[in-house]
Amino acid sequence: MNKLTQPHRLIIWILYIFALIGLSCYLYNSPIPPTSEQGLWFYSCLASIVLGELITSPYFTSPADVISNTIAAIITILTVNPWTLKLPDTSKILWLIVIIFISLILLISIIQIGFKNSNREFLRQISRAFFVITTNLGNHRIIFSTVILFALFTFHKESTKELLTISLAWVLLIAVHPIENIWGIVIKIQELFIKSTPEVIGEIAGHEFPDIILVKHLPEKTITYGDPIIVQGDNGQVTLGSALDQIGFTGELWHRVLRLPPNCQPAQDQLRKMVDHYPTGVFHYQVNSAIDQSIQEQIDRVKNQLIGIVAPDSDVMKLKIEIVRSDLDLFEGRLVEVLIGNETVLYQIINGLTREEIVEQRNSRGYVRAEARKLGKWTDDNFQSVKWVPEPNTPVFLVNIDEPLFEMSSVGFIPNTNYHISVDLSSLVTHNTAILGILGVGKSCLAFELVERLIAQRIKVICLDLTNQYSIELEPYFNQQVQNTEIASLQAIGSLGRTRIRQNVEEGGSIIEFRREFTIQLNRFLTGHDQSDLLRIYNPASFEVWRQDSKMYQNTASMATLTPCEITRIISEITLEILQGIGMSDQARCCLVFEESHSLVPEWNSAANDGDKTATNGTAKAILQGRKYGLGCLLITQRTANVTKSILNQCNTVFALRTFDSTGVEFLKNFVGDDYAGILSSLEDRHAVVFGKSSSCKTPVLVKLNERDEFLEHFRPIISLNDEQILPDDPIVDDIPF
């Protein structure tokens, strides 16, 4: 059946139609069956099975085919009304069973198509389960056979001739496929006597073990990339390969031929019969017979997706690729795949180099070599580690999906693929995270997205934002009126300290009162059970909090305001104290977001004064202690060198966007390695190298981040805090794939 062409299947279908006409002549003495229930509708079902088997879906029944089959079957059986015809009760029951079965398959098919591209993993799982049901139970043979069995039981059981004849025809059609099998035998016999003589195009020049054959090209013959080639050696072994690139210029044209994998090789005796006129040689392979259908897919793959072969000096983590073609769009971040044993392993291109080698005496050839980092084997929406290295000369194929679909659980995808990278939000918080890069490359958009994802997971977030962007972008997630009231209270308490001078310097100013009020507010926020109250946003520069810097003398003293660094310390320490009071936790409870973190937690040599140095140390201490209590931070900065390394070194997840400063690059080498650090200066906007504990890929990977507008379009409608259906007590929350 698989060897039949569509014209062949059309001819066979016509033969079956004539057979049905002959059956009608035998049973009813007429080429046209009776127009009653006993005839016409039965034959339409039988003809539908033949049509589906040979023309519409000879190999696979899609859900769309199932819908067509079931609708046609329902229309057919509805032409028979057992109550109008006053049929026995058993026929009525059987009629209802058939209707219900077919209708159920129709409904399942519609649901499968509707859920197929859902943004929710739970619905996609349902779609995949329904796909199995529909493609197995919804094919034309099963659907129309139920109708035929009803007809046999209802209208033909009284006639032994009709019952036996129609039953035999149905069995032959469903199980035996007589005409198809006879036709296939004829094709096989034909192949034994008809064979083509391949064209001689050259001779074997040498080997690059294990799978590359060097071919000396005859001047009058041509070889183009991707041509299927038969190679017959002196030992009598014949192999099928695919032509690669030209590599020599010493009087003869040299080409390399890649030996196809064993599972894509025709049988030795079949290949040998094609070239038995010649003792040795290289031949064009004409793809024109049934034996070629099993290897055509591999030949096409080599022609369309092969970019090169595994080059020397590859190791367990880094793949060296000798590029054999120049017509593909290669760049940093492209994904390639190669076999290691029987496992398909994915690598990401991170660099390209030009090379030159000597080819026979004084001649040389230049070529391009790509470098790629191992990501692993894609399993269950994650990369799983695979050990060892591929064999030399193993073909390397480009992975390419032009239009990746948005995935609710992912922060982005590997460029030009549909391989998505997600993050574990609890680990992202408790083990701290950094977003690094220059202005305008997408840092803040990524930070907004991560904050929204944290809120969706009911992890509370405190944003310390000097830019005042967060209150605009995240406006749906907090009560602006409540927030403004709390901030106004803090500002009023802070400003009152300007004239509060005390004998005890520590009691002067407004720090104590400010801290007390902040503690009350944050305690209410962090210990509250209001599931819509998950976000606080503060600008540390907006608070005027006074401290007394000198002892009182004649009712006066030196007064100064706290810096943003010092305000940041107060907020961090209060948050830690409250969470410590709640108790230890291995799950994230609260995330402190430090926007413009180089100004909030500066490195010691970037701090404006000793007070900022002390404050930064206090903030760092709170962050380092916070993990045991579910507290962590998200750092966002464009100045890696100016952020305290006491916190930055504790960030176990890093999103590195485009950056130029040498200090930042050197720092990031510790996280992403020299290879990925080397491409940071050339990254496009909204592209980042991601690495760390929370990433779904356990090695560094270059990711194209989600577009902000697309994220909002898909995400906001699902996690809106005003939507009662997503409250934590609602079971639907468990199905949201974050």
Image (cartoon, grey):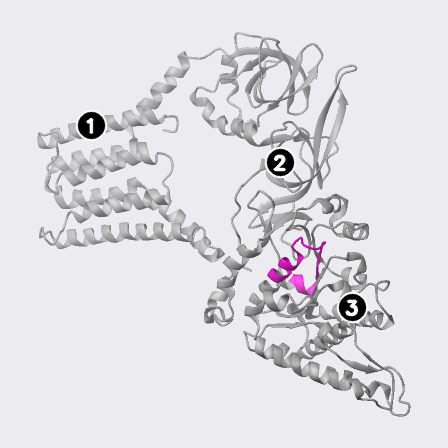
Nearest to N terminus: mark 2 or mark 1: 1
Q: Is residue 557 shown left or right of residue 79?
A: right
Image coordinates of residue 586 in percent, x first then y, are: 66, 68
User: Which residue is drawn at the image coordinates 69% and 37% (left, top)?
Assistant: 389
Give SS at disc 2: strand
Q: Amino acid at mark 1?
A: Ala
Please say if the residues under marks 2 and 1 sit with CB atoms less than 8 Å apart.
no
From this viewpoint, is residue 370 visible?
Answer: yes
Q: Position of residue 465 (x, y in %)?
A: 69, 68
Between the C-alphas of marks 1 and 3, the distance is 86 Å
Q: Residues within 10 Å of mark 1 (few under 14, many from 20)?
A: few
Q: Secondary structure at mark 1?
A: helix
Q: CA distance from mark 2 to mark 1?
A: 51 Å
Q: Give the number of the disc on residue 620.
A: 3
Where residue 474 sits in the image (x, y, percent)?
A: 59, 67
Secondary structure at badge 3 equals: helix
Q: Is residue 387 visible?
A: no
What range is drawn magenta here? Answer: 427-449
Decide which of tag 1 and tag 3 comes sooner along the chain.
1
